Amino acid sequence: MLNLLRMDLHRMPRSMAFKVIAILLVFETTLTAFTFSYMLNHTSDIMEMPASFGFVDGKLTLGMFVQMTLGQLGDFALYLAIFVVLFANGDFSTGFIKTIAGQVKSRGMLAISKFISVAIYTIGYIAFYTVIAIVDCIIFFDGVRVPDMGELIKYMLLMLYMYIAMIFLITAIALIFRSNLIGIIVGILISTGLLSAILGLVNILLDKLNIDLDLKKYTVTRSITSVTLTGDLSDYTRQIIVCAVYIVVSLIATIISYNKRDVA
Amino acid sequence: MAELLLETDRLTKTFGKHKAVNEVSLHVERGSVYGFIGKNGAGKTTFMKMICGLSAPTSGNITLFGKTGSEIRNERHKIGCLIEDPGIFPKLSAFENVRLKCLALGCYKKEYVQGLLEKVGLGDTKKKQAGRFSLGMRQRLGIALALVGQPELLVLDEPINGLDPQGIAEVRDTIHSLSQDGGITILISSHILDELSKIATHYGIINDGVLIREMSSAQMLEARTDGISIVIDNFTKASEILTGLGYEFSLVEPFHISVNADKQNAARINRALVTGGVEVSELSVHSEDLESYYLKLTGGVQNA
């Protein structure tokens, strides 16, 4: 198991997608910071806004910047999803899986290794994003303002946990279907909010059938976007459970798929 | 009989109603080079995938290194495989590709990877991306990947398919050296039967999922019919003499006949023809080649 993980982690930074995604992340975060800075400089009543709104002395706090970018999914989630699909499915798309699958005692280990690798990548991605966000705050908002460090750490950890749930779901779909295309389509649907729009239509249908069920409540995207800096952990019990279910189901379904299905 | 490294007992793989591999009972001796012959879709690749653990049999048994059932799982690390195309990361170098597999099997050492690459003639490819390799180089990289972990059994599916004559010679030499110097048992399939006949010590012929013949190369040589090719000046007279002696023959082209007889009969036929007044300007003994034998067994001139 550790050997497989070593192999995956060795391959990860050597892929072209790894470098491209890192560049895109820097570009996107910096451009967003610049845009916010420009907008805020042209808004007159910022000075009066309280810290609870994410402003200190009329300047955006780091926490609010994170919430307005990473916390809203969009491109930040999309880049992550694209990399994860390309990386996790790399063994299948190149055929490399055929050279190793027969020699491991349990093929499920190959799947577990992929999930651990993408979780590590997600941690690295968010850590790298945070570094860029700090640098951008220094450049565009005249310094890093963190009114409540505990609140920010709690928010970031919750965000990381939910991002991992989202990434596990996308990874599972890519690995079960063994398709980059399907994985990326699902990644786009989830990260751009299109899935929520589709579920909205399903909700209307359910409503017409007199079924009282809001499917959106049980999506990983709703979970991520509903978390705020000032919220308490107890406010997010449902979201935490929903994400835990996604993590467990994604893992189990993929391991079963790896063990039961022929490799090629 | 030598020790059997691999044995299958009525191994079957079904896709829907189609039996891709139908009750194949095959025997591979330790140290042998087993040539697995069959046309496209005969079931070779499916059979090999089951041996390598990439595909689960529908029924039947596999005995590997004397172990069967769930115990095989612990023996599969002794098998290296190259099934269909070599599975490589095209943006990585040969070294990095082999290194990845070494990391997966827990046997990475720089010298070990370099040694494997040198064994297959890729020792000087440096940082060149594997995606830029020629087909022959990629096949040899596939063999290097299959060799990671020092396997005792190498399963090679069409390793010389699509290669130019130079590439074929390189891969053939690599396989020959692995078998002769490395003592590795090899199960190899190929369309190019003439090339296979240069390295195989045993053969299995599969047709429509069924193993129709299994034999050593010596048995194969014996089974292939000899023929005597004669160039004469008078077909009518030669025909009377050969019919009188009880030989079957056919006219290849004017004044050139082929007699169905082994080489022991060559002197007798020559003497009879000359004595009977037929001038023999050329006489040679020929053996049926592997391809003709295969086609005769499978009953067609389809793609081997």
Image (cartoon, helix red, strand yellow):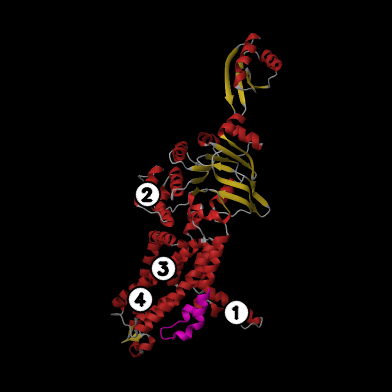
The answer for how far apart the CA atoms under marks 1 and 2 are is 59 Å
Q: Which residue is mark 2?
A: B112
Label 1: how many residues lie within 10 Å, few (<14), some (14-19) or many (20+)? some
Count of picture labels = 4
Going by the image, does A195 lie left or right of A137? right
Residue to which mark 1 is pinned: A203
Q: CA distance from mark 3 to mark 4?
A: 26 Å
Q: Where residue B151 sits in the image (x, y, percent)? A: 46, 48
Q: Which residues are magenta?
A: A223-245
- Which image quadrant for residue A214? bottom right
* Element carrying mark 4: helix
Between marks 3 and 1 in the image, the one whose residue lies nearer the viewer: 3
Q: Is residue B287 magenta?
A: no
Q: State the SS at label 2.
A: helix
Q: Chain of mark 4?
A: A
Task: Identify the residue at image location x=52%, y=66%.
Answer: A172
Q: Nearer the viewer, residue B130 or B296?
A: B296
Type of residue at label 4? Answer: Ala
Q: Chain of mark 3?
A: A
Q: Amino acid at mark 2?
A: Tyr
